[in-house]
Amino acid sequence: MLEVVSVKRKSPVLTPSSLSCLSHIPTINLTAGCAHGCLYCYSRGYRTYPGDKRIHLYANTLEMLSEEFLRKRKLPVAVYFSPSSDLFQPVPEVLDLAYEVMQFLFARRIGVAFLTKGEIPEHHMALLRAHARLVRAQIGLTTLEADVLHAFEPNAAPAQTRLRQARDLVTAGIPTEVRLDPILPGVTDSAESVRHLCRAIAMSGVRRIALGVLFLRPAVLHSLNQHLGGSPLQRTLASHFGRAVRLCIHAERSSVMALHRDARRLIYARVSEIAQECGLEVAVCGCKNPDLGAGSCNIAGEWPSAGSLFE
Ligand code: SF4
């Protein structure tokens, strides 16, 4: 049973990100922790992580955001939801707050970019449709295999729900991509699994995908061992990470254990080839693969430059 604790946010709502593709767009988290409970979620290692089966809801977000906007000389072109939570968690309090914050931003002609693994309620979808020109969407999905999704993303939306809403977003004229991140080596990267997924994505009308392979931080490793300990899934992942290397990411601000670059390069090449056969354009996340010289995956979509957003 999930516990939702209402807390007062003390730090600013609009937060700069260390990801280079978010350097011109501020980010917002409505919660600390996330009800989707993905085992690989790197926010598990954050100081603010409230523990499994609990989220902290920043109930005063709208009030603080209004005050922050009053103090700003220049408002952002768009904001990104969310670097370490999800806008569409299956929690009524989070969904209500998400709706109010999006409404507040749209009323000021400020764009909303989001990445979600959740189910977007129809009420929220109608708001997104009504402001389609101000929306950029990414749907996170790495496989169609229900047992794998259930094991790694226990409370996220089923694959078919995510694909259906990808199609709805595309139909509404909203630039929409699917993010295959994290690809789980040995678990979701077989040619058959990737082909199945890429065909379904192409059928939804999405034309571009972004790729990233799982990397490990201590908290993620702990979570995988705790939840999957001794299972075939855990043994498969462990066998692939046997030759992991330390990699500096996010403009060298943090260090993670990653597959050797040759192993990642092979996975990206295999997935890209299949995706392109399905008519999909492919981008590899450069922030997570600085040693591969990958470009930007453009996590928040494209927006006009707004100069410095944090003055
Ligand atoms: S949906 Fe995103 S933020 Fe939420 S638990 Fe999964 S990876 Fe973390």
Image: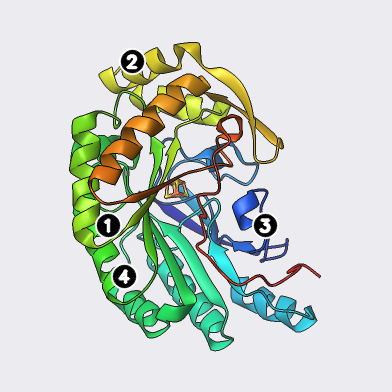
Q: Quadrant of residue 310?
A: bottom right
Determine whether, in the image, residue 58 is placed left or right of residue 103: right
Q: Residues within 10 Å of mark 2 (few under 14, many from 20)?
A: some
Viewer-nearest residue: 74 or 278:
278
Give the residue pinned by disc 2. Answer: 235
User: Is residue 79 depicted above or below 1 in this figure?
Assistant: below
Residue 169: mark in rendering: 4
Q: Quadrant of residue 125?
A: bottom left
| Residue 206: x %, y % from top left | 29, 60
| One can see residue 241 in this view | yes
The amino acid at mark 3 is: Ser
Give the residue pinned by disc 1. Answer: 162
At horizontal 35% and vertical 80% (from top left) the residue drawn is 129
| Residue 120: x %, y % from top left | 32, 67
Q: Which is in the foreground here, disc 4 or disc 1? A: 4
Question: Are dots 3 and 2 in contact, CB under 8 Å?
Answer: no
Q: Residues within 10 Å of mark 1 (few under 14, many from 20)?
A: many
Give the residue pinned by disc 3. Answer: 23
At horizontal 28% and vertical 19% (from top left) the residue drawn is 231
Local SS, label 2 = helix
Question: Are dots 4 and 2 in contact, CB under 8 Å?
Answer: no
- Alpha carbon distance from label 1 to label 2: 28 Å
